[in-house]
Image (cartoon, rainbow, N blue to C red):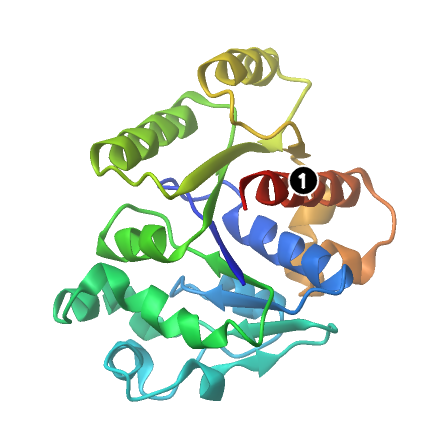
Amino acid sequence: MKVLAVYSIKGGVGKTSSAVNLAHMAANDGYKTLVWDLDPQGASSYYFRIKPKIKGGSKDLIAGKRELDDLIKGTDFANLDLLPADFSFRNLDLVLDASKKPTRQLKKLIKPLADDYDFVFLDCPPNISLLSEAVFEAADMLLSPIIPTTLSLRTLDQLSDFVHENELHDLTVLPFFSMVDRRKKMHRDIMLSLVEKYPTILNTAIPYASDIERMGLERMPLGGFTKKSASLTAYHQLWQEVLARLSNEY
């Protein structure tokens, strides 16, 4: 089982759409796949038409009073399950802080699922916090969407500095471009410069496109309502890149 966290310090960069679409790609390939919606806003849960509610909330979950197996819901798609969000996840930092070894709690919760799933995707809230550190501890790979703008690049630098300063040597960080508008010279220029600075960045860029925005209306992954589009092709290529990196590293 591999744990892939879709994470960025900055909000509004396409984390949830990427987590949902990549997970759907994995499931279509026959992999048993789980999405854990860690964001109290519950966007992944919304896309899969599942109520963002967990009985007992984050406190019971971290305290070990609820097993993840009891909370997982099936989606409308084969091989793809969801662990829904809960509004109490807004307090996850406080709940983790009150526990022993807080940064290891997510890893501890996920570990028993190893026989049930090939991939677990973590849809993470934006910020850098104790929850983020727990995500870094639990994840095998951090997929970080980056919009080709100055503020988005700044958060990638902050993430890279944090990983380096905290000696997270076992964590693979793979940035990729998201919400790209190639008509904009600034986007094109930033993409070229960032590849030189971060050679591990994935080659595939996800476009800024109306069909990705339409996911909110359809409440499903792209592949659930369209069989051919530039966005769907881009996500497919991105997933193939992720699989290739996993094969090279493990």
In this view, the residue in front, 44 or 111, is: 111
- Image coordinates of residue 102 in percent, x first then y, are 20, 64
> Which residue is labeled 1 in the image?
238
- Residue 7's place in the image compared with 157, above or below, is below
Q: Which residue lies at the image location 51% right of the left edge and 20% below the top edge?
A: 199
Q: Residues within 10 Å of mark 1 (few under 14, many from 20)?
A: many
For residue 233, side relative to residue 12 (left or right)? right
**In the figure, residue 20 lies in which quadrant?**
bottom right
The three-letter amino acid code for the residue at tag 1 is Leu
- Image coordinates of residue 153 in percent, x first then y, are 41, 25
User: Could you tell me if residue 121 is visible in this image?
Assistant: yes
Q: Which residue lies at the image location 29% right of the left edge and 36% below the top edge?
A: 163
For residue 117, side relative to residue 109 (left or right)? right
- Image coordinates of residue 121 in percent, x first then y, are 52, 59
**In the figure, residue 229 lies in which quadrant?**
top right
Q: Which residue lies at the image location 36% right of the left edge and 73% below the top edge?
A: 109
In this view, the residue in front, 153 or 181, is: 153
Q: Which residue lies at the image location 70% right of the left edge and 72% below the top edge?
A: 79
Disc 1 secondary structure class? helix
